[in-house]
Amino acid sequence: ISVTVPFGSTFLHASATGGLLGESQFTFLAGAVTAQLTVQDAVAGTNLSGPAPLAVDTGTLSLWRFNEGSGSVFSDAGPLNLTLAVAFGSIGHFPGRFAGGLHFDGGTYLLNGTPAGLPTSAGARTVQAWIFPRSSQNVMGILSWGPSGSDPFRFSLNNGQLSVNMGGGYVSNGPVLSTGAWQHVAFSYDGADGRYYLNGQPVGVNAFGAVNTGAAPLYVGQTDLSERFLG
């Protein structure tokens, strides 16, 4: 974010440049100006202008906010309308990164058994999530779809690293994530290369072989191999 000194009665302008604000700049922004921040990624379908919840943007297929506050069924704000439900155990409702959130205890997970419209075969895809991992051990599934035995897509943490399984095996990349802290994780596949992102920064790229992802089932909080999330 770059900072331009305001002139007269105009406001300070902040624009994304890939850098981070220094402490003195944070203080200046907080004490001297009114700032509006807009972040948009048309490819990933994320659009944030002001406070959450995120709006559904062009390219979004599904967006789960998990801010219901109670219950065991969770709505999809995206056009696919893929409702998720607790499939095992009970889910905890806790404060999330912006509003409400869910706590996965390492045993429970969410399921949609018959999702329609998710990227299949070698189709391009981007997945992203705010997570608060409480462990950096073993494999913890964030999101997965497709049947076991036929090249499912798995997005997970493998001993704390971002990991994706498609095209025949797990590929991990980037640093070990912190435990006990909110972090934004993302993976984008363009039909050939997969790119990993942590807190908006690229942390790795890998080429994938023949990909043939199936359509169902869809899991959140575990993979099809019952590798469940704690956090």
Image (tube, grey):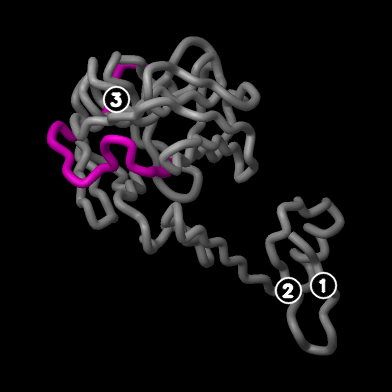
Q: Amino acid at mark 1?
A: Thr
Q: CA distance from mark 3 to mark 1?
A: 48 Å
Q: CA distance from mark 2 to mark 3?
A: 44 Å
Mark 3, other Cα within 10 Å: few <14 / some 14–19 / many ≥20? many
Q: Are marks 1 and 2 in contact (CB under 8 Å)?
A: yes
Instruction: Using the rendered view, name the quadrant where residue 202 is placed.
Output: top right
Mark 2, other Cα within 10 Å: few <14 / some 14–19 / many ≥20? some
Residue at left offset 46%, top offset 61%: 42
- SS at badge 3: loop
- What residue is pinned by disc 1? 4
Which one is nearer the viewer's eye here, 114 or 207? 207
Q: Which mark is residue 13?
A: 2
Is the N terminus in the top left, top right, bottom left or bottom right quadrant? bottom right
Which one is nearer the viewer's eye here, 11 or 79? 79
Does the magenta run of residues contain 24? no
Which one is nearer the viewer's eye here, 153 or 82? 153
- What residue is pinned by disc 3? 152
Q: CA distance from mark 1 to mark 2?
A: 6 Å
Q: Amino acid at mark 2?
A: His
Percent x, y for residue 137?
A: 52, 11
Percent x, y for residue 155?
A: 41, 28
Residue at left offset 78%, top offset 88%: 9
Where are the magenta residues, as a range? 106-127
Is the C terminus in the top left, top right, bottom left or bottom right quadrant? top left
Residue at left offset 61%, top offset 41%: 199
Q: How many marks?
A: 3
